[in-house]
Structures are given as C-alpha cells and as structure tokens.
C-alpha cells in the first residue's frame, strides 16, 4: 500500500490537456484485489479534445516528464477508436519499473460494444508497478 500511495503522488497523473477536468470520483489508488499490484489512477473528462488530440498530447507530455513510450494502439484522426485503446509508457521510480497507461475506456451505452466515436467521453491515466520485479507491462 505504501507503493500505491507513492504512485498516487506521481506528477504525471495531474498532466492533462487544457480544459480537461477530473471526473466525479475520478481519482483512486490501492492494490488490486486478486494480484495485490499497487496502482493509482485518474479519469478525466476532456473539454473539446478528440481522441487523436488527447493521444498526441500524451505522446509529447509523457516523454517530456521522463516516460518512455513502449506501446501504442492505432488511433487515426476522425475514425472510430476501439474500446480500451491505449498508449503505454514506462519509467523507473525508486528502482521499480512503473507503467503508465493512457486509456479511452468509453461507454458501452453509446453504440456498438467495442467501438467508440472519434471523440472520447472520458480518458484515464493508470499507473501500476510490480515491487517484486516480476514481469509486468501495461
């Protein structure tokens, strides 16, 4: 739980596009129920940003804050985005590998179960770590 509290204080969780606001109950941290993996998260509601604009924002902002892009789902301007599309970054924090996911979770009530429109309703930042040094990724 101590590492989860440290993750919750990472400044990257507060980095967001201009106008994006923290969603109601959009902040949390703890340890996964089944895995015990420490995590922290923020869910933001964008102003008028498209999925492409949010993704591009983090493609620049995360590396500027010392995060390395590890994986990125395809996000094309003006096209639908698949449910759960994300960017994945990593960084060592106090000798522990930490992973940052920028995700577009969507809302199942807004259309087909697995497809979002080009504009996100919300997006989330999730950080997680394995303090035991096991294999983990986002």
Image (cartoon, rainbow, N blue to C red):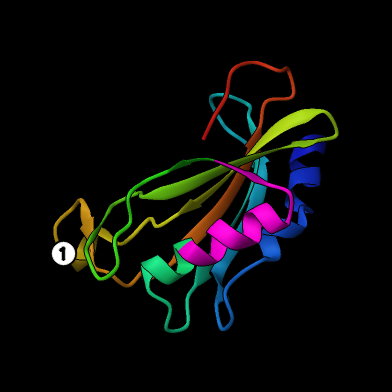
Q: Main secondary structure of the magenta part?
A: helix
Quadrant of the snapshot with the N terminus: top right
Q: Up-down: is 114 above or below 130?
A: below
Left or right: 73, with 46 as reference point: left
Q: Up-down: is 117 above or below 20?
A: above
Residue at image x 47%, y 67%? Answer: 54
Q: Up-down: is 94 above or below 35?
A: below
Query: Residue 106 in magenta?
Result: no
4 or 124, which is in the foreground?
A: 124
| Range covered by the magenta-colored residues | 56-69
Residue at image x 33%, y 56%? Answer: 75
The extreme right residue here reads 94
Left or right: 53, with 13 as reference point: left
Q: How many marks?
A: 1
50 or 128, which is in the foreground?
A: 50
Residue 71 lies, in percent from the top left, at 47, 39
Q: Residues within 10 Å of mark 1 (few under 14, many from 20)?
A: few
Kind of element beneath mark 1: loop
Residue at image x 35%, y 49%? Answer: 84
Residue 17 lies, in percent from the top left, at 57, 74
122 or 16, which is in the foreground?
A: 16
Residue 65 lies, in percent from the top left, at 73, 55
Q: Is residue 25 visible?
A: yes
Residue 103 lies, in percent from the top left, at 45, 53
Task: Kindly identify which residue carries mark 1.
Answer: 111
Q: Is residue 1 visible?
A: no
């Amino acid at each position: 739980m101590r590492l989860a509290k440290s993750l919750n204080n990472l400044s990257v969780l507060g980095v967001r596009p201009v106008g994006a606001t923290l969603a109601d109950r959009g902040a949390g941290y703890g340890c996964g129920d089944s895995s015990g993996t420490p995590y922290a998260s923020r869910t933001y509601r964008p102003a008028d940003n498209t999925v492409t604009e949010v993704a591009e924002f983090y493609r620049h902002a995360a590396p500027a804050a010392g995060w390395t892009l590890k994986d990125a789902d395809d996000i094309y301007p003006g096209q639908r985005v698949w449910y759960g599309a994300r960017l994945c970054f990593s960084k060592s924090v106090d000798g522990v590998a930490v992973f940052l996911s920028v995700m577009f979770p969507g809302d199942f009530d807004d259309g087909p179960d697995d497809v979002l429109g080009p504009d996100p309703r919300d997006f989330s930042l999730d950080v997680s770590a394995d303090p035991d040094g096991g294999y983990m990724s986002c």
